[in-house]
Image: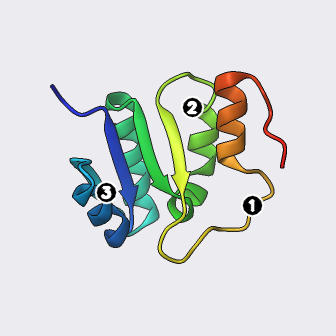
Amino acid sequence: MASKIAVMGDEDTVVGFKFGGIKDGYIITNKEEAKKTFENLIKEKDIIIITENIADKLRSEINKISEEPLPIIIEIPDKTGPSKKTVDPMRELVKKVIGVEMIK
């Protein structure tokens, strides 16, 4: 059975997830590569883990598919730490999935 989870990110992030058991990892080095990989993964995977820096480059594509139940896009910080955002994607994901907004 094929894995339904993939990770996209810098080399350190992808290698770390591979050590954790995620088989499908894609090291991304530029925007074009990110877009092509993302377009392929949304057709095949149920969960896509993506670093915030790469997700920022694909924001319009991510926003388009975020209305659909699958795939679930999980944005994580890379080795440089979290990026500054006005909207927390994890908060929005929880709100979408369970219908309740988290309060800080």
* Residue that sits furthest to the bottom in the current view: 80
Q: How crowded is mark 3: few (under 14 residues within 10 Å), some or many (20 or more)?
A: some
Identity, as a three-letter code, of the amino acid under mark 2: Ile
Residue labelled with disc 3 = 17
Asked if marks 1 and 3 touch (Cβ < 8 Å), the reply is no
Residue type at mark 1?
A: Lys
Q: How is the image coloured?
A: rainbow
- 5 above or below 50? above
The residue positioned 74% from the left and 22% from the top of the image is: 99
Q: Which residue was labeled with disc 2?
A: 65
- Which residue is at 27% across, 65% downward? 15
Please name which of the two marks, 1 or 3, marks the residue nearer to the observer: 3
- Percent x, y of residue 7: 36, 50
Q: Is residue 101 above or below residue 69?
A: below
SS type, badge 3: helix
**Amino acid found under the numbered disc labelled 3:** Phe
Where in the figure is residue 9, as x and y percent of width and height?
A: 40, 61
Residue 61, image x, y percentages: 56, 42
